[in-house]
Amino acid sequence: MAHGAVGSLKLTIERLKNSSYISIVQNSSPKIIKLLYKEVCSFQDALEEFDERRNTINMKMVKILEAEIMDVVYQFEDVIESYVLDQIHSQSEESHHGDQIHPPSMLFSVDLQELKQDVDSFIKTVKKMKRAYIHELRNPSPEEEEEDDDVVTSRINFGGNHEPMIGFSEHFIELRDLFTNNYEDPSRMIFSLDGMAGIGKTTLATKLFQDPSIVSCYTRRAFVTIGPKYLLKNVLLHILVQLNPSLEISDVDGETLAMLERMVRNSLKHQRYFIVLDDIWDEKLCSALKKLFPDDDNRSLVLMTTRIGDATDIAHDCRYDLPLLDKKDSWVLLRQKVFGQEACSYELEKAGKKIAENCEGLPLTIVTVANILSKSEKTTEYWNKVSDEKDSIYYDAYDQMSKVLLPSYNYLDQRLKACFLYMGIYPQRYKILFIELFGLHSLWNAEGIVYSAEQFREKVSQLKMVEMFDLDPCSYYILELSLKNLIIHDGEKSCYSLHSSFWYMCNKEAVKNKFFYAFNYSAGALPEEDLIYQRRLCMQNNVLLAIQDVQDSITSASMVRSLLCTGNFHEYPVPLCLEQLRMLRVVHAFTIRFYEFPMEVLKLVQLRYLSLCFNGNIPSSISKLWNLQWLIIGQKLIVENKSSCNMPMQIWDMKELKKLDVGGKKLSDPREGSFLPNLLGLHGLHHQSCTKDVFEKIPNLMELSIVISSSHDNGDQPLSCFDHVSHLHKLQSLVCIIQNPTFEAEVVAPLAPLSYLPSSLTKLYLSGLGYPWEEMSKISSLPNLTHLYLKFYAFRGPKWEVRDDEFQRLAYLEIEDSDLPLASWTAALWL
């Protein structure tokens, strides 16, 4: 987590350098901050060398060094932020006369000269730590003689060697038939067996490797388990001694790498071979080994297993993703492991099925829980307690599984570690809807744990995966975690989630790394002295905010930077306990309902991110939050309150805003000279605010979503909201939703035809508009459009004609709730 800590400090320094409201005193201060920023950027780059060398490092030593780095960085960030905040408060009080609020244009002067000694000491320490870290990566310390904690021992016995695999019999038969049939293509097959840790990949590969019908098809066979740490030479040695039974490792241990590669290639030449490469983590290793396996058109087979989906890209289309077990097979496996051939009573079976379901289909969890159950009392009372999750058995199982699961986190790319742990802020088994991911990415940005847009373009955008799928930063991070089988994607429900075993690991590692502490985390309360050092506090059950002990604990964590309320929506207001948390940069409380705007928030001048759900008006003093970059506003109104439909005029004074979600409210017309140069996303905008005056004041906007409450709203023409969108020359994503559309029986020409949209658009989402298909010509000519979503009769009519010269770059088209029969399409549309 050192990388995330350095990223946070880097963002803090950037805010000092670039803020519209802070002026660095012109003595030696600019030089101090420039040198500091340079060293922090260099430090972050050094930490990323981990990604290139992780297959040979001493992970225990690296984690010790990273923990030391994290502590030093956090301590210095506390010093510099506390100092700057003290100066700002001091100047703010001096400019405060009576009830007068300081003007939004006020500049705060910050003199860093008094911190020069702290900065010099920090830079000196950072340089020393950077040298030590790089030296450890390049010259790993000797491993201790004890058992390596990173060795993955996840083989699961689903049944005896001659018994069907519970839940995997169909997969075994399908793969066995594929590997033994004389399929038409005689070329070598490279096959990848993918799935999350503990799902049974190694077990299935072993049974395939040992199956007599497969054994008889191949003249040479080898099974090598690799893991996250490996040396190519050792891999080759273990392949060689299996291909040549008369060889001993000692016979060839002294050979050069080039000689070993030649010996492997010659041993396989003109042979029909079956090689299993178990537990692959590195794409480079796959590519290196592929060159050594000859393709003699004799149907040879290379079978790889991996938890890192993109590590086996050389398999191309020959991929097989192992699914989680269903409820039925989960119970069958649990019953077999607990009872064997013994009978199970009806009462225990009823509770046991629920216990199996709680394991969420992961075989390793089922087997581990079953092992604990088999050593415990088999009484209905105890099993009911376990089935209701009122016993620690699951957490005990997750602890035992950590040897298998933890490497997935330890060996993760530096840029992804903080993102993965952050997924643990949500309650257990929480389903993160696809639409919520962009809000999650905003949180990551506000926290400084992901690359800025500029860094993303520089360091990530050239990756093959990003180029191939034209990924935005949010989609990239989520897809990476999904490909590495750390999060579960449910395509039918359009959501992502963490398996409970990984959720537990995230929460446990987060506490160890001072990343966040969740008050609903059931593994025991954190002592108050340790809570002080946590960077984030998380409410996975929002009701806990009303408990006095929790309030006291929160206020004791004076250096916390983020308060994250992620529990289910809470209908009644609870105190936020913000008085002592002056360092807060993020307040995410959208799932708590407030009757009115909580005024204590306005004291948090460090805030970068604020999300709230409340009734009533936003106070004009919102502009006191001059650091704010993300503002998300929601309402839960039974009856619409017309007086609370407008955002205050002062919103135009908040120059730092990057993303603004107004929750269906109207923006006031901007005053003369008003300008939001940094605003990139504007969401939930009332259609009446889609004016030329508004759009001309946000010229850099890239994302816009418009909300229309009714297609017949007070007699106006809501679809005229498109008339001025052409003024947004940098707009890439446009969403327009009519929430309560009404349609005539016949499709008629709209009173407000679809205006021409900016050519910069790449994504367009329309819902409930009811336009005739003839209006589609305004969209089909957009030169950069790649994604088009048409929902709830966005267009109507019996026929849609698409010409050859339309939709030149469209890659994705989704139509939902349409009266257009598929047979009526006349299109030459290549997606």
Image (cartoon, helix red, strand yellow):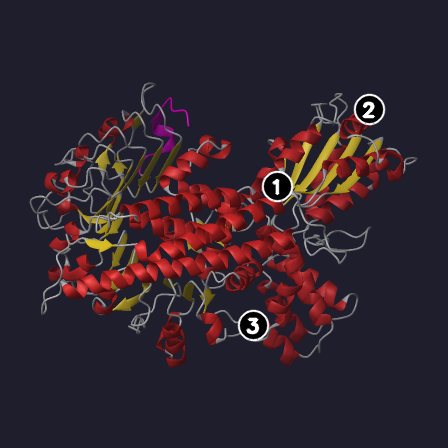
Judge the density around disc 1: few (<14), some (14-19), many (≥20) Cα neighbours within 10 Å: few
Residue 824 in magenta stretch:
yes
1 and 2 marks in contact (CB < 8 Å): no
Left or right placement of residue 170 versus residue 560 in this view: right
Hey, which quadrant is residue 371 in on the image?
bottom right
Dot in front, 2 or 3: 2
Q: Quadrant of the C terminus?
A: top left
- Residue shown at 9% from the left, 45% from the top: 716
Q: Residue furthest top?
A: 804
What residue type is disc 1 on?
Arg
Specify which label sits upstream in the sequence, 1 or 2: 1
Asked if residue 178 can be seen in this view, the reply is no
**Label 2: which secondary element:** helix
Q: Position of residue 584 (x, y in %)?
A: 33, 63
How far apart, in angstroms, are the residues tagged by discs 3 and 1? 41 Å
Q: Which residue is mark 3?
A: 389
- Which secondary structure dominates the residues rendered in magenta? loop
Q: Which residue is mark 1?
A: 53
What residue type is disc 3 on?
Glu
Left or right placement of residue 185 versus residue 93 in this view: right
- Residue shown at 39% from the left, 53% from the top: 119
Residue 97 in magenta stretch:
no
Dot in front, 1 or 2: 1
Asked if residue 95 can be seen in this view, the reply is yes
Report the disc number at residue 266.
2
Hey, which quadrant is residue 66 in on the image?
bottom right
Of residue 781 and residue 152, the one placed in the foreground of this image is 152
Q: Which residues are magenta?
A: 819-831
